[in-house]
Image (spheres, rainbow, N blue to C red):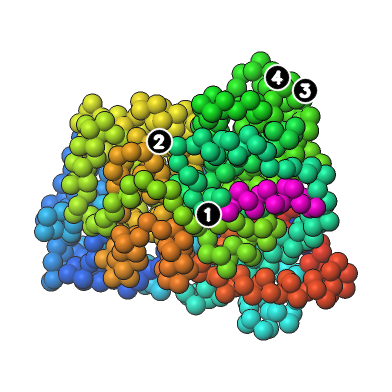
Amino acid sequence: MGERELAESVVNLKGIGEKTGKLFNKCGVYTCRDLIYYFPRTYDKFEPPVRACDLKEGEVCSVSLTIIGNIMRRKVRNLSIISFEAGDQTGKVKMTYFNAPYLINSLKSGTTHIFRGVVRKKGNFFTIDQPKMYKAEEYATLCGKLMPRYPLVKSLSNNTVTKAVQKAFNSAGKFEEFVPEDIIKRLGLMSFFDAIYNIHFPKDDATLEQARRRLAYNEFFLFVLKLRLLKKLQEENRNTFPIIEVAEAKRFLEKLPYRLTNAQLNAYNDIISDISGPYVMNRLIQGDVGSGKTVVAFLALLTAAANGYQGAIMAPTEVLAAQHFEGFKELIDKYGLTSIKPVLLTGALSARDKREAQRMIKEGEVNCIVGTNALIQEKVEYKNLALVVTDEQHRFGVRQRKALAGKGENVHVLAMSATPIPRTLAIILYGDLHISVIDELPGGRIPIKNCVVGTDYRNTAYKFICDQVKAGHQAYVICPMVEEGELDGVENVTDYTDKLKSALPPEISVATLHGKMKPAMKDEIMEAFARKDIDVLVSTTVIEVGINVPNATVMMIENAERFGLSQLHQLRGRVGRGDAQSYCIFLNTSKSDDAKKRLDIMNRSNDGFKIAEEDLRQRGPGELFGIRQSGELNFRIGDIYHDSDLLKSASMDADRILSEDPNLSDTQYSVLRGVLSTKSANSVDFNCL
């Protein structure tokens, strides 16, 4: 399959009509190239069937059992339920099917089947809801295989995606290698084509890992090369906005009822040194949740304003932008800061308010612009933009920072991130930025109390949440998935919300939040939670950034073993922001000793940087197909913790190549030049650039 075939619509593949094509479009798949790079989310591994007595709670198991006794049918409201017992010589299991009346003819007492599903325990009995049922000979053909499981939308089946991907590969040619051959040999990497094929259809775990490592290296290699080339351009930019420290900023610091930590002061001094120096500032402030990055950013914006320039701060959500704006206004009014004049600009504003904000920005009536990516829209013109601050740096990346900085000429850039990445990796990942670390927390904060518990604690946790709500507080409950069926044995917000509404008193308000909602709906729910209209918010990791609710005192994380430690720490950072004692409950649904050991680190420490180092040291392939580390750049395959060796190799390889050939002009780099110049860059997600 050449470039022309790769660019063809998926509708041109045999068996995919306009209707199915539209379903693929909803997944972001329009062309055959998109389809080949539509990687599985996880894999089904068909293990040999076990005995009833060897079933493990919370795990997907296959078990060969004979149906015992009668098949029970009943109807509860609109729900059709089929249930029966099946067993072997070692025990019995209760099977339940919902809304599957077509199965009744296949289920007969005395017949033997292989049942596969998530094992639960109710009292002393094992149960499996909605198990898949196989004949012995049918299961034998699947045993030992890894079957891809793709992200899906309603009405698009996994089988349809699998067949379509296979058809695309049937006519595909070899993909051109862009990684130099000497690197491929030295690192023992799989060929590019084989890696793409085997990420979809691996014959075993070892092949899958080889494919994954090759594609992870591709991502890191291209990422670092682009970063280095960008940095080279930035270093040539001289400072045309020399900004000096001002008396108003010093007076503000003196009036504060607390003293900034040494780490905050060092970060502020780094900023002053940069913006008053000969070159344009490109600096990252990396600080743990609650370390006080925002007040440092405010000081930088105040200093720019007092020097006669405009500054802008871009937040990842409208709710957080509004919270920054209100917080800044409060500081300005409280401490009589006359030189800084803020305005809020987000997509949620009315057309009239937007036009007025844009007018004030263009005419220079305001000099501190707070907003979302509305700040980089074409209609927004700045009078003399000198400083750009991006909150939660990994949510924007180089491109969006560059777009905002492009609203002025040689604009100073200050990025902030609460993602606690170990310094060794941060230097590579944020290679276009100088780094200041705020590694101290302000005094007076009440440490979060943590506990790691099993599923038998769930009802106790519900009672605790209920008590906290009755005491006037709020709670988060985090589930890994949006809907049922995305991953077996994993809680989803859709069903969990209903479950929680049944478990808690009716006067407690429970709401759902997830990333598939429209932005306006997400913001509306987050605002309602911030206003205390919602007591318990059942959410995916979408709340990892973008909401500050000091009244929330409980964070309960379901399937905690599925997350990386650093992401668990990020989620935990949503509580502990007020004056009341806060709590984080990590619910471990795995029986694995390794999972228990990993989660115990969260039990013992609230220090994000220590946790990040532990994550780097302990992260293993067991987590790779759990929940993605959504907060750590947008690598589709690579994991900066598990693949830290590849990241370091890619960094050294990129540096060596550019030192020998700064412009990649040698003929051996012709394919690489083409890849770097295209937006898709052979499927690497350059949203992180």
Question: Per the image, is 267 magenta?
Answer: yes
Q: Nearer the viewer, residue 597 or 89?
A: 597
Residue for point 71% across, 40% down: 387
Crowding at dot 3, Cα within 10 Å, few <14 / some 14-19 / many 20+, comes out as: few
Q: Residue furthest bottom?
A: 186
Q: Residues within 10 Å of mark 2 (few under 14, many from 20)?
A: many
Visible residue check, residue 96: yes
Residue range in magenta is 266-281
Residue that label 1 marks: 263
Q: CA distance from mark 3 to mark 2?
A: 35 Å
Residue at mark 3: 363
- Along the polypeptide, which appears first: circle 4 or circle 2? 4
Q: Earlier in the sequence, mark 3 or mark 1?
A: 1
- The residue drawn where x is 30% and y is 29% is 509
The answer to whether 592 is drawn above or below residue 30 in the figure is below
Q: Is residue 445 magenta?
A: no
User: Mark 2 sits on what residue?
Assistant: 549
Give, as a three-letter code, the residue at label 3.
Glu
Secondary structure character of the magenta stretch overall: helix
Q: Amino acid at mark 1?
A: Ala
- 301 vs 105, nearest the viewer: 301
Taking the image as drawn, is residue 563 in sight?
A: no
Mark 3 and 1 residues: CB-CB less than 8 Å, in contact? no
Mark in the foreground, 3 or 1: 1
- Residue at image position (84%, 73%) is 661
Q: Position of residue 201 (x, y in %)?
A: 54, 67
Q: Horizontal placement of 320 versus 564: left or right?
A: right
Disc number placed over residue 355 in the picture, else none: 4
Dot 4: few (<14), some (14–19), or many (≥20) neighbours within 10 Å? some
**Quarter holding residue 643:** bottom right
